[in-house]
Image (tube, rainbow, N blue to C red):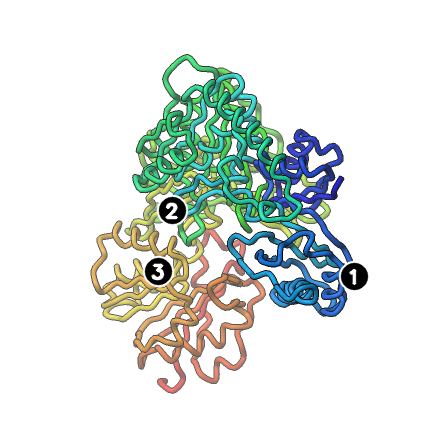
Amino acid sequence: MSKLFATCPKGLEYLLRDELRALGAEDAREALAGVHFSGSLELAYRACLWSRLASRVLMPLAEFDAADADALYAGTQSVDWPAHLSPDGTLAIDAVGQTGALNNTQFVALRTKDAIVDQFREQGGTRPGVDVERPSIRLNVRLHRGRATLSLDLSGSPLHRRGWRQGQGEAPLKENLACAMLLRAGWPAIAAAGGALVDPMCGSGTLLIEGILMAADVAPGLRRDYFGFLGWRGHDAAMWDSLRAEAEARASAGLRALAPVFFGSDQDPRVLNEAKRNAQAAGVAGFLHLSRQSAEHVQRPEGDNPPGLVICNPPYGERLGQQAQLAVLYRALGERLRTQFVGWQAGVIVAHEELGYAIGLRADKRYTLYNGALECRFLVFDLAEEPAPRERVEKPLSEGARSVANRITKNFRHLRKRFEREGVSCWRVYDADIPEYAAAIDIYTAIGVDGNFVSLEPFPHIWLHVQEYAPPRDIPEHVARDRLRDLVRGAGAALDVPRERIATKTRYRAKGGSKYGRFEQRDEFLIVEEGGLKFRVNLFDYLDSGLFLDHRPARARIRELARGKRFLNLFCYTATASVYAAAGAASATTSVDLSATYLEWAARNFTLNGFGGASHHLVQADAMEWLRHDRGEFDLIFVDPPTFSNSKRADDFDVQRDHARLLALCAERLAPGGVIVFSNNLRRFALDPVLPDTFDVKDVTAATIPPDFARNARIHHCYELRRRTER
């Protein structure tokens, strides 16, 4: 009996433990990124041949104190290496971890190698060579808490390399992760019942091929021509040949009995060709149906087959701006699952919770898995037929909801006529007027829609944007939740707005303070009007809607100042101020923001209003860095920075700490006679006392707070700055 350790990606430990127990390892117990077990050499061989989840199978040869290089050398030399490796053989060494003075894995591997070859030299003069690709034996050195564990790597190369992969797509799954997804989704039982397997984003076919091999009882290591024990002197060739023969017989019987119920599709013809090549190399091409189509058109396979499994690895959207675009794909996938695959199971791996929610289905099970270093969620859906909708009976408003409704009705009547005269269609109707019901409610009167969202209702109509304020710490969460529900119901009743047209941003308590919960991914872009201009807003998918309503007077002021001016908008967001400047006959506008998503949104705003061409520039850059390198000159600069930013692609920014430096950079770009309009929404903001040495500063905050925000005079601060030398 030997002690053994099978490594695996994080998240697969319990599955691997159960798999090894099924292979005969009765004492298998999970550890971090692996499983300890013990058994005979035959069990170790079976693990290498049959494990669908393990990365490597290690057999410890020695464990010893290794506080420094000398101790590591001595401990390595305590092993009888000629018993494991012939003098004319080759070796490779992997080192992981650190301890004491040993904190460089390359040095640890080198020192271990020296100890081994020195032993051979001392005994006969001939020493083994080094081969990092296919050595006779591969060793693993693990350092932890002053100890070293020196193991023989029986797998030789990672076990997820099955031997069938000929090509791959841009973001392939490792084969053992694919098997973990199939197991978590219940594929073995579905396959045993005769169900089909469908992957609507199959890429190079990893999930489908592993699903076929699993259903046909084909050993995952059967096509490998290299294992770490093949050049080991302790290798039992007869035993290995017997195990391979048994696996060949099982595979032959399993493939003969297998039905061709495996269906893959993808939009990319290149990866479909890779999937065909891989399936041929794996010997399963005859069971697999591949077609070129998008996931939005996936259909249940024809035939009266038992319920099957839909499983896929959709794109993750790691690049800037991709998540919002991918939400459309995820929603379409969810809709196809809901309508085409009733009674089936589905499994989808996602890297971002928001995209998982965009599927629009409630996950019955959620598992944490790791695709390399990336933490993901594997969502499993039971696509049971939805019950017929029950007739909805509206409950009467609670006393609190009635109070909210009465206050909103009063506010609406008071402000509506004024805003209608001024052409204002988006405004704040409630701002924590009743302290117990602490939220801001904004009205957005939509005149149309933009993008993939389609509304069946006539325009214009009202939508509501509800943003909850953080409740006091002494208010229980269930009380705050009930109050928010009453507030939303009261607002809907007062303004006759159905629930589906009310966007609610709720807060939850978390480490570091109160935070907003997840946002929906509905891709519903409305078109609204302000000051005779049109803007896109999205009330559900982002924290802010795309239009800061409290800046309405500031935007109007920019239009007044912009005629004939070269206008610069820093931290431009969706560039609404730039559109106002263009409408005010600015000679040119330049809008700078770090987000590609918001700049695309800004471009749509320009197009909506008929502005375009070379005189209107959109620049993706960090505003501070751009100011340091740009040499342009501007007559009017609008600066509305975030309170705080810690983007990975730019230096941290704190408006209180950094605004003087920011404005000094703006001054270098300001033309003679020019003006800077500087705004921010830090409630306790204080202007740096050094600024009046450089600028004439005029506090215009009061003039830029619109009447619907009068309850909150600190919603923002706004200043106009002109250089003192130009008085």
Of label 1 and label 3, which has the lower sequence position? 1
Is 416 above or below relative to 586? above
Q: In this view, does 417 lie to the left or right of 38?
A: left
The image quarter containing residue 668 is bottom left
Residue under the point 26% across and 49% down: 608
Residue 527 visible to the viewer: yes
Mark 1 vs mark 2, foreground winner is: 1
Is residue 41 or residue 652 the one in the foreground?
41
Q: Which residue is label 2 attached to?
A: 537
Of label 3 and label 2, which has the lower sequence position? 2
Which mark, residue 65? 1
Cα–Cα span, label 1 and label 2 = 64 Å
The image quarter containing residue 85 is bottom right
Check whether the beta carbons of the residues at disc 1 and disc 2 lie within 8 A of each other. Answer: no
Looking at the image, the residue that sits furthest to the front is 124
State the image coordinates of residue 344 (x, y, percent, origin top left). 49, 21
Is 497 above or below relative to 603? above
Q: Which residue is label 3 attached to?
A: 577
Mark 1 vs mark 3, foreground winner is: 1
Label 3 sits on a secondary structure element that is helix
Is 626 above or below relative to 38? below
State the image coordinates of residue 664 (x, y, percent, origin top left). 44, 79
Label 1 sits on a secondary structure element that is strand
Label 2 sits on a secondary structure element that is strand
